[in-house]
Image (cartoon, helix red, strand yellow):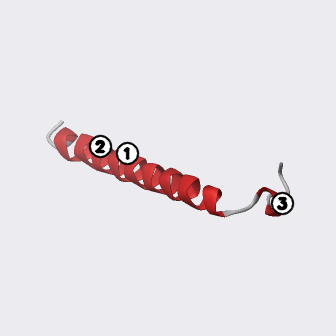
Amino acid sequence: MDHVQFIVGGYVVTFVAVGVYVVRMLRQARKYNSAISDGDKPWR
């Protein structure tokens, strides 16, 4: 039980880093989505 702080800290750092990455990717996707015309979006 001596290393619990390091293990929990590692999980916290990992989840925060993944969360920041997801937020950045979603913001970029929204920004670039408005730059693409509807005719160039085959999924619509």
Q: Between 40 and 25, which is closer to the camera in this rendering?
A: 40
Who's the residue at 44% across and 49% down the image? 23
Q: Which residue is mark 1?
A: 15
Three-letter code for the amino acid on which mark 3 is drawn: Gly
Give the Cα separation between the discs numbered 1 and 2. Answer: 5 Å
In terms of depth relative to the viewer, which is nearer, 16 or 27? 27
Q: Which residue is mark 2?
A: 12
Marks 3, 2: nearer the viewer:
3
Secondary structure beneath label 2: helix
Q: Where in the figure is residue 10, as x and y percent of width and height?
A: 28, 49
Q: Residue at x 42, y 51 (%)?
A: 18
Quadrant hosting residue 36? bottom right
Q: Amino acid at mark 2?
A: Val
- The Cα atoms of the two marked residues, 1 and 3, are separated by 37 Å
Labelled disc at residue 39: 3
Q: What kind of element bears circle 1?
A: helix
Quadrant, the N terminus:
top left
Tag 3 or tag 1, which sits nearer the N-term? 1
Mark 1 neighbour density, 10 Å: few (under 14) some (14–19) many (20 or more): few
Q: Amino acid at mark 1?
A: Phe
Q: Is residue 27 above or below residue 2?
A: below
Q: Is residue 35 left or right of residue 26?
A: right
Q: Residues within 10 Å of mark 2 (few under 14, many from 20)?
A: few
Say if mark 1 contacts mark 2, CB within 8 Å: yes
Labels 3 and 2: the sequence-earlier one:
2
- Give the distance between the C-alpha atoms of the residues marked 3 and 2, in whole angstroms: 42 Å
Mark 3: few/some/many CA within 10 Å (<14, 14-19, 20+): few
Q: Could you tell me which residue is drawn at 59 percent across and 61 percent down? A: 32
